[in-house]
Amino acid sequence: MGGWNGSLQMNRVLLLLLGCLPAAALAASPGTPTLTPADRKWQPFGLADRAAVLGDLAEPVCPSVTLLRLRPETRLPPHSVPVDRTYLVLSGTIHVGFGKKWDDAGMKTLPPGSFWLVPANTSTFEWSEDEVVCQVTVARPAKDCPRHEEPVSLTPDQVAWRPLGTGERAVLAGDPDQPACPSVVRYRFPAGEPSLAPADATGRGSHWTVLSGALLRETGAPGDAAAVSRDLPPGTVFVPPEGQFPKAGTETVVQREFPGTGPGICVWRSLHR
C-alpha cells in the first residue's frame, strides 16, 4: 500500500471514487454531448488521473459520470462511500475485492469490458495490474426503487445476452422497465441501423458508452444534406439525441446507463456540450 497512508490520502481515495470534486475545477470546453478518447481532458489527482463527463459534480449525492485512469500497480485500500455506483472497465485489467480487509486471494480479475456495481456503504479495494481506465457512474435511485444489497461483478464472458430485434440485449443491473429507477443495459448489434424499441433507443438522462466496434453519428438533423457522419470509436461516451440513434459501422457493443430520478435537486448536465 505504499504511498497511501493517513487520513488525507484516504480522503483523496474517497473523493476520487465518488467523483465529487467541485465542478469548476473540472469544467470542459464547449462541444457536443459526445466524449471520444481523444477528447478526454485528464487532470492529475493523487496516484490517478480524472476526467469529468456528465453530472453535477458539486453535489456528491447527485448522479455523475467520471473517467478514472489508474497507473500500473496502483493499490486502493479498503474504503466505502455512501452512494451506489457502477464501474465499467474501458481499458487495462483491474483486480477488485469486497470487504473491510485486504485479501489477495479474494480479488476478482476484471479485464476490459467488465462491469461491477458497488452498493452504498460497501467496502471495496482495488489493484490495477497495468494502466486502467474506468468509467464511474454515481446513481440516484428513488426511494421505491429496488436496491442491490450485494456487489455485482461481471466479466464480458459472463454477460447473458437475449435477442432484441436484429441484435441482442443484456440487462446488467436494475430494471429498464421502471423509468424512474437506475439501470444498466448492454446492446450488441450488427452493422447497419440497430433495431431498438423507442424505450431502449432513448432515455432522458441516459448515457451510452461504446465498448467495441464503431458507431456512425450524423451531426445534423435526419435527412439534412449538410449532415456529417462522425465516427464514435470504442471508449466514446455520448448522449444520443432524442428519438435518434447512431448506426453501427461494424458489429458493435454499447452500454447504456440511467442513473435514476431520486429525490433532491440535482442537475444532470453535460460538461462537454
Image: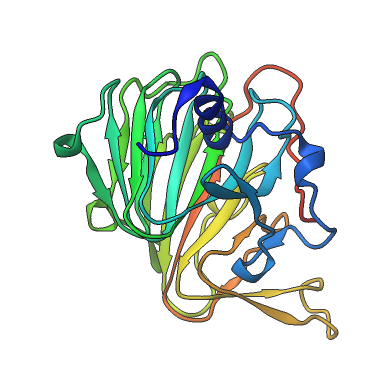
Residue farthest to the left?
Answer: 105
Q: Residue furthest bottom?
A: 225
Which quadrant of the figure contains the N terminus? top left
Q: Residue at (43%, 18%) from the top-left corner?
A: 121
The spot of residue 165 in percent (x, y) is 42, 63
In this picture, residue 220 sits left or right of residue 98: right
Foreground residue among 60 and 182? 60
Q: Position of residue 149 (x, y in %)?
A: 34, 20
Write the residue at 62% across / 22% down.
Answer: 262
Residue 1 in sight: yes
Q: Camera-side residue: 156 or 188? A: 156
Q: Using the rendered view, name the quadrant where residue 91 is placed.
A: bottom left
Q: Is residue 72 above or below residue 139?
A: below
> Where residue 151 sits: x, y (%)?
32, 29
User: Relative to residue 45, is residue 28 depicted above or below?
Assistant: below
Quadrant containing the C terminus is bottom right
The relative height of residue 101 versus residue 38 in the rendered view (above or below) is: above
Disc tally is 0
Q: Is residue 230 left or right of residue 2?
A: right
User: Residue 133: horizontal and vertical position, in percent?
Assistant: 48, 56
Residue 249 left/right relative to 21:
left
In the image, 220: left or right of 118?
right
